[in-house]
Image: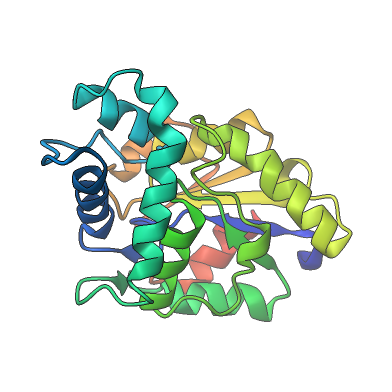
């Protein structure tokens, strides 16, 4: 396989970026704006999409017919991100090795984008604040408003990449890189290659148990990242 025929789809949170709780703060502010009261808890987020997280968060908060509210909630969340005008204060940072790993893959001719549970405006904000916007074609990414199930995002990204580059990134020519078993499951369910990175809340053993094709402790060894991606 030529490297130009390879599509790497990066997870964002705790794979490329530590956002310092930005997403949770935005959920709380959006909920308060919409419902006039504080949000007591946000549903588990690791590896999940904003569509799924929002549904469970609204249900936990006692909102009637929470799924009927999801689109309005995500739209309000997007407006709140836009109102930040590219700023979020301190706390958003690239994880060690992320900049070098993305740059090395770009130098090798690999197409790169994101497959993330974040809605696009939030993903773009986090990546920009972390200094990771270069080399990632966000137009062919897949985002958390698309579906509650992460695996359903993979064909969306592949279709976008086919339209943009004229290349069919079927099977293992798509590589998902992420820090949770749900990232791995999304890859396996769609025939993609799965690279786990133990920089989030799941240890390497959990990613290996999920049957990732390769598992890295982090992104600091660029040579190991390239070897994991290329298989």
Q: Nearer the viewer, residue 104 or 11?
A: 11
Color encoding of the figure: rainbow
Q: Is residue 219 visible?
A: no
Q: Residue at x 37, y 63 (%)?
A: 81
Q: Residue at x 12, y 39 (%)?
A: 37
Q: Measuring from the top left, give residue 199's x and y in whole percent.
A: 31, 55
Q: Measuring from the top left, give residue 129's x and y in whole percent.
A: 36, 76
Q: Measuring from the top left, give residue 137's x and y in whole percent.
A: 64, 68
Q: Residue at x 69, y 76 (%)?
A: 108
Q: Measuring from the top left, give residue 222's x and y in whole percent.
A: 48, 73
Q: Is residue 39 above or below residue 200?
A: above
As drawn, which residue projects farthest toward the right? 166
As drawn, which residue projects farthest toward the top? 65
Q: Is residue 105 visible?
A: yes
Q: Is residue 119 above or below residue 68?
A: below
Q: Nearer the viewer, residue 91 or 71?
A: 71
Side of 16 relative to 108 (left or right): left
Figure disc tally: 0
Q: Nearer the viewer, residue 187 or 79?
A: 79
Q: Nearer the viewer, residue 121 or 132?
A: 121
Q: Residue at x 29, y 51 (%)?
A: 200
Side of 45 relative to 174 (left or right): left
Side of 135 relative to 130 (left or right): right
**Which quadrant would the N terminus be assigned to in this image?**
bottom right
Tell me where residue 36 sits by quadrant: top left
């Amino acid at each position: 396989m030529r490297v130009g025929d390879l599509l790497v789809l990066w997870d964002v949170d705790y794979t490329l970026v530590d956002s310092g709780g930005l997403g949770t703060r935005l959920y709380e502010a959006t909920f308060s704006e919409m419902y006039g009261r504080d949000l007591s808890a946000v549903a588990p987020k690791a590896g999940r999409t904003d569509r799924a997280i929002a549904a469970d968060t609204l249900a936990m908060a006692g909102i009637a017919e929470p799924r009927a509210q999801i689109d309005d909630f995500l739209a309000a969340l997007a407006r709140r991100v836009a109102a930040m005008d590219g700023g979020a204060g301190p706390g958003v940072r690239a994880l060690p090795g992320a900049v070098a790993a993305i740059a090395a893959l770009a130098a090798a001719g690999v197409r790169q984008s994101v497959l993330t549970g974040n809605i696009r405006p939030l993903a773009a904000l986090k990546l920009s604040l972390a200094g990771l916007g270069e080399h990632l074609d966000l137009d062919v990414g897949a985002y958390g408003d698309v579906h509650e199930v992460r695996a359903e995002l993979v064909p969306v990204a592949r279709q976008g990449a086919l339209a943009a580059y004229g290349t069919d990134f079927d099977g293992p020519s798509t590589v998902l890189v992420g820090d949770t078993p749900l990232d791995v499951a999304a890859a396996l369910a769609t025939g993609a290659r799965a690279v786990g990175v133990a920089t989030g809340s799941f240890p390497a053993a959990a990613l290996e148990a999920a049957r990732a094709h390769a598992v890295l402790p982090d992104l600091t060894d660029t040579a190991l990242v390239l070897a994991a991606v290329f298989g």
